[in-house]
Image (cartoon, rainbow, N blue to C red):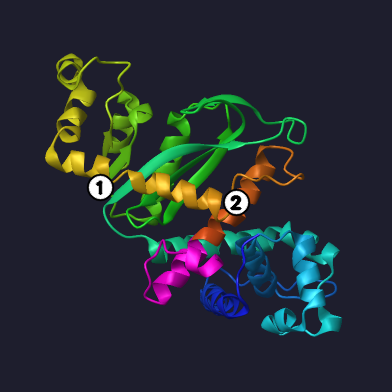
Amino acid sequence: MANISYQIARKIVTILRELVAELEAEKRGRPRATRRGRPKRYNDSDILVMLALASIMGLSLRGLYHRLKNSRLWARLFNLKPANIPHLATLARRKNDSDLRRLRDRLYKKTTTNLASGIAAFIDASAIEADPKLHPNANWGYSSKGMFYGYQLHLACDLKGAVLFFTVTKASSKEIAPAKYVLKEAKKINPKLKYLTGDASYDVTALYRYCRKELDAKLIARINPRRAITVDNAISLAKGERKRAFRLTCSRFGTILLNKRAVVEQVFSQLKEIIRIDELPFWVKKLSHAKEHIKWLILAYNVLLYTNKVHAENLRSIKRLVA
């Protein structure tokens, strides 16, 4: 659990409320018809801010409920009186509500759009290990560290570390299909993207062609050593799409971007060490559950980055917020 002071939590809640207020002020299509029946006691915006802060702090729904119930100071943060604190069952039901999920997705998109910058993105995948007894629907797969059981997190980030888009697959999934989906959505978030950088696992002709034709961008990937003994040998053997891509990869600009690819490794490190994204709760029983859980955590990470941006701090210096 992240150790966040009340002062830092108040800053984060203030920023979240401002973002949600901007979302609610947007005009989206025709006005929604008034629902019949008893009105909601708690607004979607209030519940969303509570759940987002709980994700940042690493609190479960039960932990959030007890924090609000046992501390008047934290209840006052959401303008709640002890008698008006939402029950645990209410929090659980509203977290799965479709309207709140849509609002959360819009909040993620708005936060990411405000953070996105530059013309380069970096893509990679990381293992999210799971216990076979607690997560029976995950499966076995391979990573750079060997065989593991669980899921894979595929994400694209920019040079400053903002997560542009991500997806979660089972461990046995290949990397190319998720990469196409992640890069396509990242391009929507930041249309200025022109260069996409990955490791040797993305050295695939179909992916080079997809980035050039569908995304109007150039993929720079490390040369896969399984397909060539040396760089010169790879360039001489390559044809068509790969040969065109290798010229950029071996250029001075391509070398600089490949050297900056460490940023995506640092993002994974922060997600695992600070956000605890690799600690799956017991209720994650299938892939859709894993996606929902990780979506809240990625939102929490980007909200911390945005908090630093608002206060003119280094974006990835988030340890000072949660230490």
- Residue 166 seen in the figure: yes
Which residue is painted at 63% across and 71% down in the image?
49
Picture quadrant where residue 100 is located? bottom right
- Residue 311 part of the magenta segment: yes
- Residue 152 part of the magenta segment: no
- Of mark 1 and mark 2, the one earlier in the sequence is 1
Local SS, label 1: loop
Quadrant where the N terminus sits is bottom right
Q: CA distance from mark 1 to mark 2?
A: 32 Å
Q: On screen, 214 above or below 246? A: below
Residue 194 tag number:
1
Which residue is painted at 57% across and 77% down in the image?
17
In the picture of the structure, the residue carrying the numbered disc 2 is 276
Q: On screen, 17 above or below 110? A: below
- Neighbour class for label 1 at 10 Å: few (<14), some, many (≥20)? some
Quadrant where the C terminus sits is bottom right
Local SS, label 2: loop
Question: What are the residue bounds of the magenta stretch?
Answer: 302-323
